[in-house]
Amino acid sequence: MSAPARPRPTACLALADGSIFYGMGFGATGQTVAELCFNTAMTGYQEIMTDPSYAGQIVTFTFPHIGNVGTNPEDDETGDPVAAGMVVKWMPTTPSSWRNIQPLSDWLAARGRIAIGGIDTRRLTRAIRQQGAPHAALAHDPDGNFDIEALVATARSFAGLEGMDLAKDVTCAQTYRWNEMRWAWPDGYAPQTEAKHKVVAVDYGAKRNILRCLASAGCDVTVLPATATYDDIMAHKPDGVFLSNGPGDPAATGAYAVPMIRDVLDKTDLPVFGICLGHQMLALALGATTVKMSHGHHGANHPVKDYDTGKVEITSMNHGFAVDGQSLPEGVRETHVSLFDGSNCGIRVDGRPVWSVQHHPEASPGPQDSYYLFERFSEAMAARNA
């Protein structure tokens, strides 16, 4: 008795080095090109796909069970998926969560995002770890027709993320107010009605949960576009300035962001707090430099040591660039470091309420290990106003 015929592949992932991975497509059809990274988180695939920091990247999920709790609007970090595509081991199963509104494949298709299943993600992840994040082209064709040479050429033609300012592509179009707090049972997202501090959040690709954490910490949040100037910020008479996460090369975004941050530091005594790209923007404004990492940090199990307390926090990470800890100028000290590779994960200006972290405290992988950072920001504003 002959073995049953294997189904014809309907998706193809082509790397710039010529490696080809065939699988089964789901989500949207078509083709996309981006940098390929891997994420080790076991949960949160919807939040990852809608995190603006993943602009210009295709995400390989190392955990095989992706999609089996479906999707729902409450878990979006921004309006639509930002990651260019998705790579998984097993095809998504029928959603089994009471919170499900739409199956993952339908959710991706409705938003124009391509996905491929049936891939040996361990082999792919090993290649990324050993060789660095490659450029890749991902195609989904229900008929299984692929021009492999053209796909490889497309992957090789991708310019890469170095020198690329992606914050302008994902920032808000205009200023808006935010008062929604963190999700809590059974009410969901409640509004902040007793805010104590006025905060301007500069949006380089801000995640909604960051804004919710600021609101839950007692902040009245006004969100400004990435290109906001010093005068734009001060027109709102803030008690503090927050610098958000975001995608791309910090040196490129810094061309317009760094002068604004320097003005805030030089002309005011306002508390300043940054996360992810905001951390890198602050470091550049203080005179440090950033570097492109081999394959970056993407996951929800990253141990980070807080030098001030000696505590090790389990954090969520998503970055392909890092602050060079050796480049920090006098008066700026390293406060957090990755226990995976020793890379910088936090800085603070001596004697001033100005600090930032590379990891994502709002993502709650600890689950509350790093929330104190939002409370510290609130306390700093209260102390200044007192």
Image (cartoon, rainbow, N blue to C red):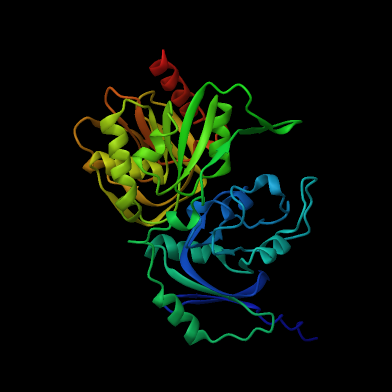
Quadrant location, the C terminus: top left
Q: Horizontal placement of 334 versus 186: left or right? A: left
x then y, percent, for residue 109: 68, 66
Q: Horizontal placement of 275 versus 3: left or right? A: left
Which of the two residues, 333 or 109, is positioned nearer the viewer here?
109
Name which quarter of the figure residue 144 lies in.
bottom right
Name which quarter of the figure residue 266 lies in.
top left
Q: Relative to 111, does residue 262 appear above or below in the rendering?
A: above
Residue sticking out furthest to the left = 330
Q: Can residue 37 be seen in this view?
A: yes
x then y, percent, for residue 351: 27, 22
Q: Which residue is drawn at 57% across and 67% down?
A: 120
Which of the two residues, 123 or 174, is positioned nearer the viewer here?
174
Which of the two residues, 144 or 301, is positioned nearer the viewer here?
144
Q: Which residue is drawn at 40% across and 37% down?
A: 233
Q: Residue at x 44, y 75 (%)?
A: 155
Q: How many labels does the image show?
A: 0
Q: Horizontal placement of 150 versus 187: left or right? A: left
x then y, percent, for residue 252: 33, 56
Q: Relative to 235, does residue 197 appear above or below in the rendering?
A: above
Q: Horizontal placement of 105 versus 168: left or right? A: right
